[in-house]
Image (cartoon, grey):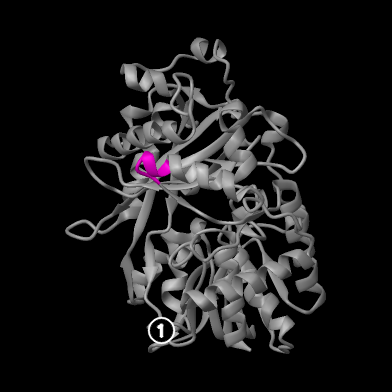
Amino acid sequence: MKYNTLIIGAGPAGIFTALEMLRKGSKKKIIIVEKGQSVRRRACPKSKTNRCVGCKPYCHITTGFSGAGAFSDGKLSLSCDVGGDLPRLIGEDLAQETINYTDKIYLEFGADEHIEGISNPEEVKEIRKRAIRAGLKLVDCPIRHLGTEKAQSLYLAIEDYLIEHGVELLFGYECKDVVLEGDVCTGAIVARADGEDEHIIHADDVVVATGRRGADWLEKLCAEHDIAHEPGTVDIGVRVEVRNEIMEKVNEVLYESKLIGYPQPFKNKVRTFCQNPGGFVSQENYDNDLAVVNGHSYKELKSNNTNLAILVSHNFNTPFNQPIEYAKKVGELCNMLGAGHILVQRFGDILDGKRTWPKELSQSNLKPSLPDAVAGDITAAIPYRAMSNIISFIQAMDEVVPGFASYETLLYAPELKFYSNRVKMDEDFNTSIKNLYCLGDSSGWTRGLMMASVMGVLMGRKLV
């Protein structure tokens, strides 16, 4: 099997690589290999069972066409200040220009034209004042909110477009290894999830775009084949849930409040991420049945709560340099205490040094939007350094959003973001292996839908 371009992973980076090649008139033969299924065949049974059933061989929320993006709340960050370090590699001007270009493509496929966070500049100033007083930095970022259900229909439209224009999509196959001849990549070995039908796909160019879901696999691939890389950052934190009334003003003015702090005494970077007004806390399953918490929000269906992540950045270099493995161990401890489920605890109980009991949750104003979360003690699993940072940050947030640090505020764990392996490359995305390119969140250079899509657009132009 011989192609001009082989793309491994059908997340935003891989999708937009192929899409931009087509838009630029490329006649190259393109194949995308995806471990999961088409958007049409992706369905989480939890909507019917109210409990995670541990789908095998992979979680439908994290795996399939468009990756985790189809089941996220679908927020497109329209500023190059948000979304990772790609601007540092390619330059801020090109990054912002390509964001604007990519945003238009999303609009063509059905994205909502409304932009959040730009209509009340005076209110934004007031929120920034409170943030400064609390020792936090407010990052301005216009947001285009797709909504979970709208994101799925949008990415389905893109999937159909790719197929109609000759891109081959190979679903249900995962990449086992890349094929190298000296320092040149000539293809990849793929097989079905059950290990059957293993074969080589030869290609002139191989693009690895496996997303956060494939970060661990890519890290091992880099180590095995001496692909130049370095340990990056891994985020460990919690998903916080409060009543909509608490976040009402921030939700109205900003939709997503992107706040950054460096709390004493450790001064690690701590930030908010993925705020979901009227949203729902959700569970995602990774390899080895690792359950992690996330959140999403729909355009139409709304809950009484707002959720957002609070993440603490960790870096490891010497003598330990395996940040993904470290984060996984933290996640495994949380899962162990929750009997395989997500843990939830009230903030007040954390300050009182006690676990949370189911009866106490049932008596609160705030009802968990994740029905199968297990009440317990997340402080028994999350390391002291991270937990101290999270507590201090929540207390600082209370000065920006009064009531955020209330007794019944809920903390879910573990929230983990596996970005850690950063592949070394130049501004044209050339790695140390000729004809092998690594894109998106798994490359360590991007975070989120928009910047991964941007990296795909630029890769598509280069391949044309």
Q: What secondary structure is marked by label 1?
A: loop
Name the spot of residue 4 as percent of width and height, x first.
Answer: 63, 87
Kindly indicate the quadrant of the structure image that contains residue 39. bottom right
**Residue 291 in sight:** no
Which quadrant holds the N terminus? Answer: bottom right
Name the spot of residue 397 as percent of width and height, x first.
Answer: 43, 35
Name the spot of residue 335 as percent of width and height, x first.
Answer: 43, 33
Task: In this rendered view, identify the residue nearer to me: 10 or 424.
Answer: 424
**Residue 315 in sight:** yes
Kindly indicate the quadrant of the structure image that contains residue 390. top left
Type of residue at label 1? Ile
Task: In this rendered view, identify the residue nearer to me: 270 or 399.
Answer: 399
Q: Which span is picked out in magenta? A: 131-136
Q: Is residue 106 left or right of residue 61?
A: right
- Circle 1 Cα neighbour tier, 10 Å, few/some/many (<14 / 14–19 / ≥20): some
User: Where does label 1 land, which residue?
Assistant: 433
Q: Among all residues in the image, which is located at the extreme left?
A: 319
Residue at figure coordinates x 40%, y 33% from the top left: 394
Q: Is residue 7 left or right of residue 103?
A: left
Q: Is residue 317 left or right of residue 287?
A: left
Q: Is residue 33 left or right of residue 429?
A: right
